[in-house]
Image (cartoon, rainbow, N blue to C red):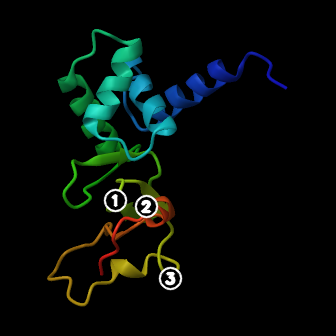
Amino acid sequence: MATGTEPQTHSEELKSSIRASGLKVTAPRVAVLEVLQHAPHSSVEQVFAEVRKTLSGTSAQTIYGILASFTGAGLVRRFDPPDSPALFECRVGDNHHHLSCVGCGLIQDVDCVIGQAPCLTPSDDSGFTIYSAEVTFNGLCRACQTSGLPTTG
């Protein structure tokens, strides 16, 4: 049963996570985190459009800056699907991967292929210290398959 305190509690959780990352809590930062929690895999433009609905004075540059600081602080993960603008999500620290539908653009999370981040061990690291790896599985989602879109391999 709803008690009427859920939005306040959720907002306080967002503020706490921002503070814990060492960043100052601002209304635009809370709004960006809120958008990404409800719409993971969002582009800067999508986040900007959603934030402007409640904070009309917010600029695109502010959103770029917030996403950059959140990414640097480890609150948000940026990933770059092929032929797409960068996308952002709140699921961080687990080195998960993504499924990407080439028909409709749907993006879904998928856990690491064989357990504890095996993809972090490349055949040759060339002296790099590896922090993360991006794996995107491209294909057709069920809806696109049943709609008759051609499959390619």
Q: Tell me which corner region of the image, top left, top right, bottom left or bottom right, holds residue 2.
A: top right
104 or 69: nearer the viewer? 104
60 or 127: nearer the viewer? 60
Q: Amino acid at mark 3?
A: Ile
Using the numbered discs, state the Cα–Cα distance from disc 2 to disc 3 in whole angstroms: 27 Å
**What residue is shown with label 2?**
144
Q: Position of residue 20 (x, y in %)?
A: 48, 36
Q: Which mark is residue 103?
A: 1
Which residue shows up at 28% across the image and 72% down it? Answer: 130
Q: Which mark is residue 114?
A: 3
Mark 2: few/some/many CA within 10 Å (<14, 14-19, 20+): some
Mark 1: few/some/many CA within 10 Å (<14, 14-19, 20+): some
Q: Tell me which corner region of the image, top left, top right, bottom left or bottom right, holds residue 119.
A: bottom left
Q: Give the mark nearest the N terminus, 2 or 1.
A: 1
Q: Is residue 144 above or below residue 31?
A: below
Mark 3: few/some/many CA within 10 Å (<14, 14-19, 20+): few
Q: Amino acid at mark 2?
A: Cys
Q: Position of residue 98 (x, y in %)?
A: 40, 63
* Any part of residue 93 in sight: no
Q: Nearer the viewer, mark 2 or mark 3?
A: 2
Q: Give the mark nearest the N terminus, 1 or 3.
A: 1
- Cβ–Cβ under 8 Å for marks 2 and 1: yes
Using the numbered discs, state the Cα–Cα distance from disc 2 to disc 1 in whole angstroms: 6 Å
